[in-house]
């Protein structure tokens, strides 16, 4: 089985920074895409950022210029550097991977709260 372990969430003041990390382990035979999604209370889960095996990235308009996604293919890890955080970034952040065979896996989520 595949396991995704997320870390790095927490409470930060507006304008602050956080770095989320996600490590994938288990029976993985090639990861095509790795991404971070987020779900705020009362809202649907949405894409924050995603990166493919070819290092093509895509960001939600709301985070462009503030968030940076990166991955380490050798370690099967994906990070999300979040700068200039705003209260509206408050959400549970989920890591997701999609393998070359088309299987998708989710992490358990990590809470990010931006508040003064």
Image (cartoon, rainbow, N blue to C red):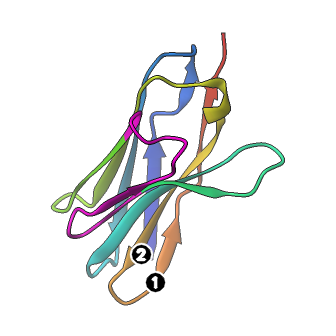
Instruction: Assess whether residue 65 is covered by the magenta stretch.
Output: yes
Residue 99 drawn at (x, y percent) = 36, 79
Q: Return the residue nearer the eye: 4 or 33.
A: 33
Question: Farthest residue toward the bottom?
Answer: 101
> How far across and down, in percent of the image, does residue 115 sit?
66, 17
Extreme front residue here? 61
Q: Quadrant of residue 23?
A: bottom left
Which quarter of the image is occupied by the N terminus?
bottom left
Residue lying at 62% horizontally and 57% vertically, measured from the top left: 46
- Using the image, determine if residue 29 lies above or below residue 87: below
Give the total of numbered labels: 2
Is disc 1 placed on a helix, strand or loop? loop
> Residue at (72%, 43%) from the top-left corner?
40
Q: Residue at x 49, y 40 (%)?
A: 63
Residue 79, located in which quarter of the rendered image? top left
The C terminus: image quadrant? top right
Asked if the residues shown at circle 1 and circle 2 are in contact, with their CB atoms under 8 angstroms apart, the answer is yes
The residue identified by callout 1 is 103
Instruction: Give the mark, 1 or 2, whose residue is nearer the N terminus.
Output: 2
Query: Is residue 52 placed above or below 87 in the rendered structure?
Result: below
Residue range corresponding to the magenta coloring: 50-67
In 3D space, how far apart are the residues under numbered discs 1 and 2 (Cα atoms)?
Answer: 6 Å
Q: Could you tell me residue 76's position as x and y percent?
A: 27, 61
Q: Residue furthest top?
A: 116
The residue wearing badge 2 is: 98
Residue at image point 46% right, 22% down = 84
Relative to residue 113, is residue 34 drawn left or right? left
Q: Main secondary structure of the magenta part?
A: loop
Residue 101 placement: quadrant = bottom left
Label 2: how many Cα within 10 Å (few below 14, some 14–19, many 20+) = some
User: Residue 69 appears at what percent x and percent y?
Assistant: 34, 47
């Amino acid at each position: 089985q595949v396991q995704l372990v997320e870390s790095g969430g927490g409470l930060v003041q507006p304008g602050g920074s956080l770095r989320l990390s996600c490590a994938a382990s288990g029976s993985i035979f090639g990861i095509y895409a790795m991404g971070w999604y987020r779900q705020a209370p009362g809202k649907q889960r949405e894409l924050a950022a995603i990166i493919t095996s070819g290092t093509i990235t895509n960001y939600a308009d709301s985070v462009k210029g503030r968030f940076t996604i990166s991955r380490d293919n050798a370690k099967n890890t994906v990070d999300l550097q979040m700068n200039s955080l705003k209260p509206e970034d408050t959400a549970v952040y989920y890591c997701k991977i999609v393998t070359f065979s088309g299987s998708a896996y989710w992490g358990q989520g990590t809470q990010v709260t931006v508040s003064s």
